Amino acid sequence: EALPPGAADAEEIETASVRFAEAEAEASVARDRLAEAEKARLEMESAVATARTAERDATAMATMLGAERQALSALLGVSDGAAYPPVVDAVKVAPGYEAALAAALADGLEAAIDPAAPAHWQGSIAGRTARALPAGAEPLTAVIQAPVELGWALAHVGLVPDAAAGDRLAASLAPGQILVTKEGASWRWDGLVRRLEAAAPAAVRLEQRNRLEQLEHEFADADQARTSAVD
């Protein structure tokens, strides 16, 4: 039985309204998805830009450190082909104590450990025992790794905290002993005192060697950062 014209129109309107609401809901979902996609795109672009910046920065850092490492390696390699390499190249000193070691051994750091060298370190002799350092002085050997040939000389070197301590303890030095500060001042058993002055060449070389070792680690870290940024 056919519906009255008014009822048919109302049913069509209701059906259309339902379909419109469904279409509106689908459109809303689509808009939300589009917004999410746009957000994801922007985040991806930002991440890519950040990664590229990180790569550029890491590459620049690796390049700078590599250049410094190469320059120092070339500078410190001057003695590699020497017939009698200086003992300074066989010594490892804690960073910050380079001037103290240079003050203690002075040009002795340029001597070799090869007995055939014109100037070389003989090392300790059986039967000799080093006197104890004055109370208040610490053995410089605590911050140094050196060939055994330097053992006797270094056993006579005490480290004091400042010039006041050096002045006070100098009178207690036994023959052959010397006191040094971290900064490079020194007091010798025979009365010779050296206040702070320009860095000795040996101290500069020791600092350069320490810097080179530090550069090896920094360069490796920078190179790893660059690789990670690329990946």
Image: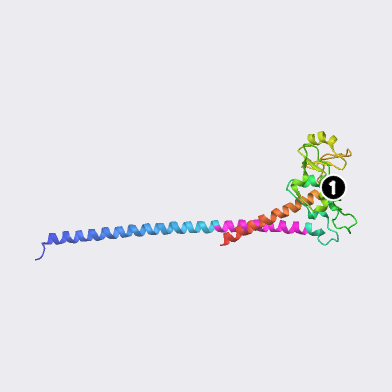
- Residue at image mark 1: 106
Give the magenta range. 51-74
Q: Position of residue 228 (x, y in %)?
A: 58, 60
Quarter holding the C terminus is bottom right
Q: Residue at x 74, y 47 (%)?
A: 143
Q: Is residue 178 above or below residue 209?
A: above
Quarter holding the N terminus is bottom left
Q: Provide the major secondary structure of the magenta segment.
A: helix
Q: Position of residue 134 (x, y in %)?
A: 81, 37
Q: Does residue 225 appear left or right of residue 175 in this picture?
A: left
Q: Does residue 73 appear left or right of residue 40 in this picture?
A: right
Let me know if residue 179 is in the magenta part. no
Residue 60 in view here = no
Q: Position of residue 176 (x, y in %)?
A: 87, 43
Q: Is residue 200 above or below residue 48?
A: above
Residue situated in front as seen by the camera: 144 or 31: 144
Q: Residue at x 78, y 57 (%)?
A: 76
Let me know if residue 61 is in the magenta part. yes
The amino acid beneath tag 1 is Ala
Q: Does residue 121 appear left or right of residue 141 in this picture?
A: right
Residue situated in front as seen by the camera: 138 or 162: 138
Q: Residue at x 26, y 58 (%)?
A: 21
